[in-house]
Image: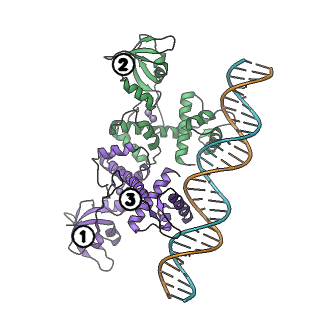
Chain colours: A purple, B green, C cyan, D orange
DNA sequence: ATATAAAGTTAGATTAGTCTAACAATTTTA
DNA sequence: TAAAATTGTTAGACTAATCTAACTTTATAT
């Protein structure tokens, strides 16, 4: 099996486990853009390599080895994103696709150097935690903006999504990490929120947007 | 055909044409570490794509399109090497293998940014010219040190080889680009040279080393 | 509880890039 | 110039990663 294939499958499995709580064949297929039979046969190989535990018709589970290797791919991805933003003046909306390619570079020394130049950063430009060299992540329990109530004061801490369109949307409204927001109104019909940011006009954010903004209550 | 495969074959062909004057199937096979039948079948595909001109038993020639695309791969390789040395504090002996991987990244904007940060550099850390965005290279006609005569004063301008072992050898002797040397003696038996660098003890360099040092006469 | 839908599986085919074995053409050497 | 060496070609096979079609198992909804 090719290194890139291995890394892409492991990463997808790791993120599915985080996001959905479970790794299903069809979820994995959708995520990777391949058919179910493809995933099925790949998962058998991953099991054979000791990266997943799996029985017919049961959900897939990463072994601790699989988890660790997946976390290291994610580490490289997020280090690259951070390097591009901090050291090469890219916008946070530009870096995901580049990182998607660079995460597969085999020269460990490259990522170590990035890490050093960045001062061993704990978070990437989107607020996601960067796993350490042993694959350990300390994830903070942020809440999504849509769980807040009227009158809550919050700080934006992370995003649930790297997506360029979403980031362009946020850029257009001056929503960045560490921005403080006040929840002014919640529309009962569609759960959209009216929020205000200091010194800016109030904004209306749809439920889809609020779901993707991870915040900390002040 | 996969982008990486295409780029590796084009680059190998381009460099063979430069170094040997001709692109042979076996040369290409050796360079790429694949068998002759493999190269044979790939070259047919390259012809079909319009990247090479070729007839049975005749040497392969790159079309101008092929040459241009090859030069752009080499551009990326050398920009990466330069970026790693100038902006990330890597040594010139460390960067080739990393560049070998990064040259295949598809995000053009990444290389444009490197180019900007480096001020549109004309040469890489080993003195090789960096092709411009149109694939044009202006190559200077350096001579190899082994062609010099006793008493010649020269400046090291480039290397014929990226090889880590060779670069480690040069590091150990404080031979860098722009260093000035005087040819003190040439041994008729093995063509080895005794040379001196200002403020350093004289050195004896084998023919293999002299062949790989490209210099300009003062 | 049954029918329907969703998820998972199997079988068999395909494509890119590679190989070895056998042979043919060309070039070099004696 | 004939033999030997090198270079190039053909045929046929293999592996990784993918697909579609047909089928089975499990979950969901009426
Ligand atoms: Mn990302
Ligand atoms: Mn990110
Ligand atoms: Mn190089
Ligand atoms: Mn170089």
Please state the horizontal and vertical placement of residue B71, each as a whole percent of the image. Answer: 50, 37
Calculate the distance from the C-alpha at mark 2 to the C-alpha at mark 1: 67 Å
Calculate the distance from the C-alpha at mark 3 to the C-alpha at mark 2: 52 Å
Residue bearing the label numbered 1: A195
- Identify the residue shown where x is 40% and y is 68%: A21
Query: Taking the image as four quarters, which one is ligand 2 found in?
Result: bottom left
Kindly identify which chain the residue marked by label 1 belongs to: A
Q: Which mark is residue B180?
A: 2
- Identify the residue shown where x is 46% and y is 15%: B148
Kindly identify which chain the residue marked by label 2 belongs to: B
Residue B25 higher or lower than C6, as above or below: above
Q: Is residue B176 visible?
A: no
Q: Are marks 2 and 1 in contact (CB under 8 Å)?
A: no
Residue bearing the label numbered 3: A164
Question: Across the whole image, how many numbered discs are drawn on residues?
Answer: 3
Query: Share a chain, discs 3 and 1?
Result: yes
Calculate the distance from the C-alpha at mark 3 to the C-alpha at mark 1: 22 Å
Near mark 3 (Cα within 10 A), the count class, few <14, some 14-19 or many ≥20, is: some
Q: Say which of B135 and D26 sits in front.
A: D26
Residue D29 higher or lower than B211, as above or below: below
Q: Are marks 3 and 2 in contact (CB under 8 Å)?
A: no
Query: Share a chain, discs 2 and 1?
Result: no
Q: Say which of C11 and A208 sits in front.
A: C11
Please state the horizontal and vertical placement of residue A63, each as a whole percent of the image. Answer: 43, 60
Nearer the observer, disc 2 or disc 1? 2
- Identify the residue shown where x is 33% and y is 66%: A212
Near mark 2 (Cα within 10 A), the count class, few <14, some 14-19 or many ≥20, is: many
- SS at badge 2: strand
């Amino acid at each position: 099996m090719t290194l890139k294939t291995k890394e892409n499958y492991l990463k997808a499995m790791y993120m599915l486990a985080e996001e959905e709580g479970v790794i299903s064949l069809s979820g994995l297929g959708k995520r990777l853009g391949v058919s179910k039979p493809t995933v099925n046969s790949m998962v058998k190989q991953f099991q054979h390599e000791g990266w997943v535990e799996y029985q017919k018709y049961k959900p897939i589970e990463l072994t601790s080895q699989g988890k660790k290797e997946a976390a290291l791919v994610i580490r490289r991805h997020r280090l690259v994103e951070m390097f591009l933003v901090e050291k090469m003046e890219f916008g946070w909306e530009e870096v995901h696709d580049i990182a998607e390619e660079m995460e597969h570079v085999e020269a460990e020394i490259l990522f170590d150097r990035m890490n050093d130049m960045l001062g061993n950063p704990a978070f990437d430009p989107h607020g996601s935690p960067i796993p350490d060299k042993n694959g350990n992540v300390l994830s903070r329990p942020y809440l999504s903006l849509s769980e807040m109530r009227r009158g809550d004061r919050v700080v934006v801490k992370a995003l649930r999504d790297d997506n360029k369109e979403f980031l362009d949307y946020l850029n257009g409204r001056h929503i960045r990490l560490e921005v403080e927001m006040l929840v002014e109104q919640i529309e009962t019909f569609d759960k959209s929120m009216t929020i205000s940011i200091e010194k800016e006009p109030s904004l209306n954010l749809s439920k889809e947007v609020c779901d993707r903004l991870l915040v900390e209550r002040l």
